[in-house]
Image (tube, grey):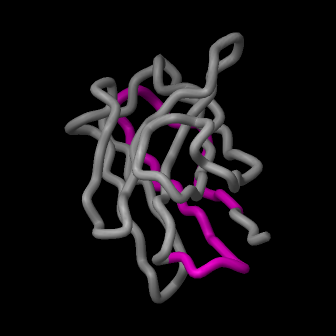
Amino acid sequence: QGQLVESGGGLVQAGGSLRLSCAASGRTFSSYVMGWFRQAPGKEREFVARIAKNAMTYYADSVKGRFTISKDNSKNTLYLQMNTLKPEDTAVYYCAAGWSDTAYVRTYDAWGQGTQVTVSS
């Protein structure tokens, strides 16, 4: 089935940066759309960014210009560079793999366990 494992979360002050990683195993990494989602307490899981099989990238408006998604197919690893972090970015961040190039949670069929990102003001 494959496994996704996130790392790199933590506590950072507003304006700071973090880099999340997602190591994938058991799948042909380059064959999937890979995405980052996040879920804050009491809120639904929401799209953050995705990278298509052709390496095109897409971002939620709330993170555009601050976050960068990338992948290294040789390492089967997905990244999310997060700069100029804001308190409203506080959430559990999940990486996901899917077949369809969309921002919809339901189109991703493999998920990591998540990594906590906390931004203090």
Q: Residue furthest bottom?
A: 74
Q: From what the image shows, is residue 96 above or below residue 27?
A: above
Residue 55 percent location from the top left of the image: 29, 66
Q: Position of residue 2 (x, y in %)?
A: 75, 71
Which quadrant of the view contains residue 79? Answer: bottom left
How far from the left and from the top, in percent, is residue 91?
A: 60, 28
Q: Residue drawn 58% across and 58% down?
A: 97
114 left or right of 95 in image: right
Report the span colored magenta.
Answer: 5-29
Residue sitting at x 56%, y 56%: 98
Placement of the N terminus among the 4 image quadrants: bottom right
Dominant secondary structure, magenta: strand
In the rendered image, residue 79 lying in the magenta stretch gets the answer: no
Q: Where's residue 12, x and y in %?
A: 51, 36
Outermost residue to the left: 65
Q: Is residue 43 above or below residue 64?
A: above
Is 75 on the left or on the right of 9, as rendered? left
Quarter-of-image position of residue 11: top right
Q: Is residue 33 above or below residue 43?
A: below
Residue at (46%, 30%) from the top-left corner?
Answer: 13
Residue 20 among magenta residues: yes
Q: Which residue corresponds to the image point at 55% horizontal and 26% vertical from the top-left?
A: 90
